[in-house]
Image (cartoon, rainbow, N blue to C red):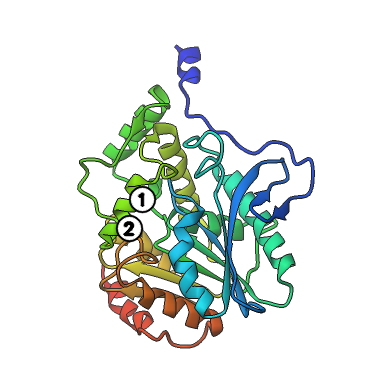
Amino acid sequence: MALGGAACAPLEFPAGPRTAPARLEPDAFVTADGARLPLRAWLPEGDARAVVLALHGFNDYGSAFEAPAQVLVRHGIATYAYDQRHFGANPDPGLWPGAATLAQDARDAFALVAARHPDAPVFLLGESMGGAVALLALDGAGGLRPAGVILAAPALWGWSTLTPLYKATLWLTAHVAPGARFSARGLNIQASDNIPMLRALGADSLVIKETRADAIWGLVHLMDAALAAPPADGVPMLLLYGANDQIIPPGPTRAFARRLGSRQRLAYYGTGWHMLLRDLRADIVLHDAAAWIADPDAALPSAADRAAAQFLAAP
């Protein structure tokens, strides 16, 4: 029975040995273990006044930042995004690479982007799962120290926030049938009010539609670690959250936001959904992000930072 249980344990597919320095190519981020992760870059004309390394969400890939990057480019901000391991156009999509591998990839990619733009401040942007990866990349030995971090609806729904029934169900499924696949069909969950965008994602063959049980297991471990990670002291941080988010519940986000330091703050959007950067009113959020990148201590144009007080005051 023990051997049978071990054979059905959740699987993880981490990076291999670091055999060469990581590098950037025109269309790939080549990791230290030789993996070629597809890379996209949106660059303004002339020198960028700031640079963003963007980390996409779960089951998504780097093209998630196509529309947001077009807005940032108009503000003179360059954006880089790569397909994280086992997502997008990478081999074996849907396998879970592990939180440590995702965080180390982010550290390596950030260092390369910063070296390419030595005269510009470099920021880290994480959307949903990418937000959790960003928090882990900041934490611990070798943690990043970017000019600032933007967390867009970060995935902070870890074990400590799950009900006992959810915990037991996920544990059983991930250990008994780790390769079982699940979709969001029938859950009646809406990620954005931008319906054409959602339909395009549904038709995109690189967006994962059915998720392995052990990948969900790994994601929850990642979110739990991110929720427990202390906000990096001295690193400006902007946490973006929408009132209509049906993916990440407000409780964990509120708890995390209450721990933010003096240069770290929450922006709360009453019309925002989970995909804040691609919602119908994404321009409001992106203009706030651009203004914050220009001056992390200034008030946001939309006043979403002031609207956050009521959200934080809720029980």
Percent position of residue 209, x then y = 36, 40
Task: Check the picture and name the quadrant holding the N terminus.
Answer: top left
Q: Which residue is nearer to you in this view: 242 or 143?
A: 242
Q: Residue drawn at (40%, 69%), measured in percent from left and top?
A: 240
- The image quadrant that residue 277 belongs to is bottom left
Residue type for callout 2:
Met
**Extreme residue toward the right, this view:** 20
Residue type at mark 1 is: Leu
Q: Position of residue 62 (x, y in %)?
A: 51, 54
* Residue found at x 41% / y 33%: 212
* 14 shown above or below 197: above
From the viewer's perspective, is 45 left or right of 59?
right
Query: In the image, residue 60 lies at what x, y percent?
Result: 44, 49
Q: Which residue sits at x=61%, y=44%?
A: 101
- Image quarter of residue 134: bottom right
How many residues crowd around disc 2 within 10 Å: few (fewer than 14), some, or many (20 or more)?
Answer: some
Q: Quadrant of residue 156?
A: bottom left
Whether residue 261 is visible here, answered yes or no, is no
Q: Are marks 1 and 2 in contact (CB under 8 Å)?
A: yes
Q: Is residue 166 left or right of residue 4?
A: left
Visible residue check, residue 177:
yes
Which of the image's four quarters has the C terminus?
bottom left
Identify the residue under disc 1: 201
Residue 76 lies, with reference to residue 209, above or below; the image says below
Q: Where is residue 192 shown, x and y percent of the image? A: 29, 60
Residue to which mark 2 is pinned: 197
**Callout 2 secondary element:** helix
Q: Secondary structure at mark 1?
A: helix
Q: How dense is the environment of label 1, judged by Cα within 10 Å: few (below 14), some, or many (20 and up)?
A: some
